Image (spheres, rainbow, N blue to C red):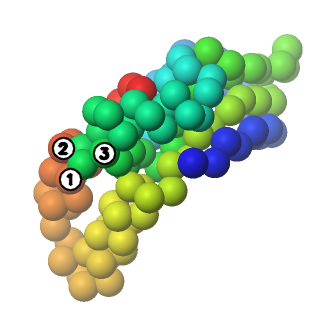
């Protein structure tokens, strides 16, 4: 698992509610109040589907910082490396085969991604 510190400059201002809404609306992103990647990784081994974390990113929602202009967003994200590649590969396969069946990937996302760690 990698830990990534992000610093995003935005063209327009944003509110904390908008940020939470975007995170909640993205099915591949999870949140956590934990700040230690080992704790999150252990939770994935213990409670994740087949001992894996399938989220593409786990954002530490306790540490999202907006500057006074609300155009600069900073925070931490944990990037698991084993489970998320499985969903990415399946999604790429579906796109490459022109299957156009979103129900398959939506079912896998629903069954495998936990929204909070």
For disc 1, the marked residue is: 108
Q: Is residue 106 left or right of residue 36?
A: left
Q: Secondary structure at mark 3?
A: helix
For disc 3, the marked residue is: 51
For disc 2, the marked residue is: 111
Camera-side residue of 1 and 68: 1
Camera-side residue of 30 and 15: 30
Q: Are marks 1 and 2 in contact (CB under 8 Å)?
A: yes
State how many labels appear: 3
Task: Please state the horizontal and vertical placement of residue 107, each as a whole percent of the image.
Answer: 16, 51
Q: Earlier in the sequence, mark 2 or mark 3?
A: 3
Judge the density around disc 1: few (<14), some (14-19), many (≥20) Cα neighbours within 10 Å: some
Mark 3 vs mark 1: in front: 3
Q: Is residue 24 left or right of residue 71?
A: left
Task: Please state the horizontal and vertical placement of residue 102, each as a whole percent of the image.
Answer: 20, 60
* Residue at image point 70% right, 43% down: 4
Mark 2 vs mark 3: in front: 3
Look at the image and tell me in which quarter the C terminus lies.
top left
Above or below: residue 106 compared with residue 97: above
Q: Earlier in the sequence, mark 3 or mark 1?
A: 3
* Residue at image point 51% right, 49% down: 80
Task: Please state the horizontal and vertical placement of residue 114, each as a whole percent of the image.
Answer: 32, 34
* Residue at image point 62% right, 23% down: 35
* Residue at image point 57% right, 48% down: 1
Judge the density around disc 2: few (<14), some (14-19), many (≥20) Cα neighbours within 10 Å: few
Res. 115 in view:
yes
């Amino acid at each position: 698992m990698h830990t990534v510190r992000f610093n995003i400059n935005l063209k327009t201002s944003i509110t904390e509610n908008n940020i939470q809404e975007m995170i909640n609306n993205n099915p591949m992103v999870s949140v956590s109040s934990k700040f230690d990647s080992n704790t999150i990784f252990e939770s994935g081994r213990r409670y994740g589907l087949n001992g894996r974390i399938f989220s593409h990113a786990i954002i530490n929602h306790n540490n999202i910082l907006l500057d006074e202009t609300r155009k600069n967003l900073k925070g931490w994200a944990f990037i698991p490396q084993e489970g998320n590649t499985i969903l990415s590969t399946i999604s790429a396969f579906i796109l490459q085969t022109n299957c156009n069946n979103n129900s398959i990937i939506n079912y896998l996302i629903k069954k495998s991604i936990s929204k909070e760690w």
